[in-house]
Amino acid sequence: MLILGAVAAALAGVVVKNLPEKQASAETIAVDPQEIKSVRFEGKSLPLASLRAVVTTHAGEHVDDGKLETDRAALQATLVAQGYLAATVERPVITFDHGAFVAFPVKTGTLYHVRDVVVTGPSAKRAGVVTLVRGDEAAADTIARAHDHVVAVIGKPVDVKLHPDADAGVVDVELATH
């Protein structure tokens, strides 16, 4: 019975001290319901290190709706930059139970791959070999390298236009020269 009483007291924010026989003492613990106890991501096969790197909300801080929205957008942008073009990160679910527990629901969707690459515009013939090929992951840094290569070769601005095909999980990349 003493064990059940101690469990109930702990759940109520009370600490029970073990004292000599038939003596007991209790202290009330101040619990800040807005203090974040944990931040986690809910989803399958998530790139956790990348997601943790962009989140600015941490345990020990107070719940800040603006900061959580900024984190949600940063998480989604990170996934898209890694090639998950249809990724969604929903508003965080916050559970209050002697503190705040924050969970970001994440759906990565398909990792998109390049289906086709085309250079268009007046300088297209001067672009040379494009460093992006069919089957490459549609990650932002991979596409940026191809863009930068074409800019370096032709010496003029180049726009990147992505044409995703959600059903096939592929994207056609257009490098439009000026």
Image (tube, grey):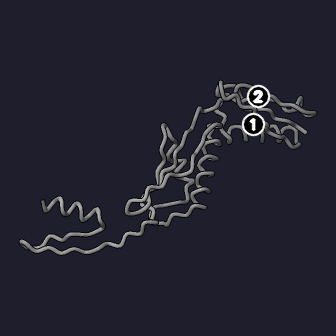
Question: With 124 as the anchor, is 113 left or right in this view?
Answer: left
Q: Earlier in the sequence, mark 2 or mark 1?
A: 2
x, y percent for residue 98: 37, 63
Element class at badge 1 = helix
Q: Which mark is residue 117?
A: 2
- Up the image or down, 23 lies above or below 64; here it is below
x, y percent for residue 51: 54, 48
Q: Which mark is residue 146?
A: 1
x, y percent for residue 118: 80, 28
In the depicted view, which residue is nearer to us: 57 or 48?
57
Callout 2 amino acid: Val
Question: With 156 as the anchor, is 66 left or right in this view?
Answer: left
**Residue at x 87%, y 38% (from the top left corner):** 154
Quarter of the image with the N terminus in it: bottom left
Element class at badge 2 = strand
Quick check: marks 2 and 1 in contact, CB under 8 Å?
yes
**Residue at x 72%, y 40% (from the top left corner):** 145
Disc number lying in front (2 or 1): 2
Crowd rating for badge 1 (residues with CA inside 10 Å; few <14, some 14–19, many 20+): some
